[in-house]
Image: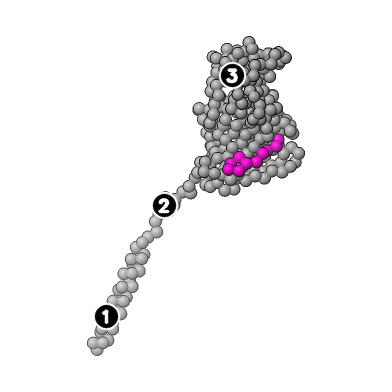
Amino acid sequence: MMRTFRRKNYQVLLVAFFVLFMFGCSSKQPAPAADRTASLVAAPQFPFFINFNGPWAFMPDPDDSTQLLAIAPVVKGHGSAYIAATNETSVNPGIYQLTGIPSSTLVTNPHLVVVNDMISKLTLKDVLGKAGARYVIKLPMPSQLTPYRTGLVAVSNSFPVANPRTIEKQYASHMTLRYSVPNFGGIKVDGKDDKLKPLSFIPAIGDTGSVDIGVGPLYDLQEDECHNHAKGAFKALVDLFKVKQVIDYPDYNQKICMASDPQNPHIGGQAPPPGLGMAGSDCKPALMVLDIQN
């Protein structure tokens, strides 16, 4: 009898323990949906930059609002364009697409000073069709356009620039496109040059998280005291898009420089005096941002 009683007590204790255990487990209710969402750690984002130098114009792609077009003319005295990270490739005139970066909503930068103008979709179509005369890079829309170098110049829509000292500004001569990316993998540039030679380039992104795209002067080219090489690069840019913009550089010595200025519609005077050093450090045409009309 005693053994039966003890066995029954033992069974009761087991049942009680099981009930308490199940109650304890069931008391751990799942977190509300909002709490679970808050507990998820957002995927980290990293800043990524694309730096442009040379005579470039930037404009939204009229056929795709998520894309930005960067276009530069082929300039006499300049080498081929290039795309560089920790590795590098030269780029012939052609049309190329950079992929692997999410597009953003472009936010206006109040500190950006560029040459603004407007062209038609027909003019853009004409520029895109000018084989051998331009470099075209299509990119995802960045979150911001930021100048990383500027140069003091005066810009006007008529030649010569009247009263240049009263209108001079620090115009962007080198531009940074800013993005946020989850990682640096998958970034790639594809396309064909105007002779249908394909390009497929994977930039090896270094610690700076940046890619450089440029088209600059040949290193053995000497600039003159009138900045005619830089003026010529700017002229090539505005002529490509058929806009009327003229640039002048300090010291604004128009009496000496006007006759040889490549922007002068009546050019034909004496050559300017040489000797400002290497054009690689001096060629700073102001960059352009264009709006597209229908």
The answer to whether 261 is drawn above or below residue 95 in the figure is above
Judging depth in this view, the residue of 53 and 78 nearest the camera is 78
Give the residue at x 68% y 25%.
236
Q: CA distance from mark 1 to mark 3?
A: 102 Å
The residue labelled by disc 3 is 249
Task: Establish if 77 lies above or below 40.
Answer: above
Please tell me how many numbered marks the rendered image carries: 3
Question: Which residue is disc 1 drawn over?
Answer: 9
The local secondary structure at tag 3 comes to loop
Mark 3 vs mark 2: give the one in front.
3
Identified at 44% across, 52% down, the residue is 40
Q: Quadrant of the N terminus?
A: bottom left
Residue denoted by label 2? 39
Tell me which numbered mark, 3 or 2, is placed earlier along the sequence.
2
Residue type of the residue flagged with mark 2? Ser
Name which quarter of the figure residue 239 lies in.
Answer: top right
Answer with the quarter of the image where residue 240 lies.
Answer: top right
Q: How is the image coloured?
A: one colour
Q: Residue at x 60, y 21 (%)?
A: 276
> In this orientation, which residue lies closer to the viewer: 83 or 128?
83
Magenta region, residue range: 84-93
Residue 42 seen from this side = yes
Q: Nearer the viewer, residue 21 or 249?
A: 249
- Residue 213 horizontal/vertical position (percent): 61, 36
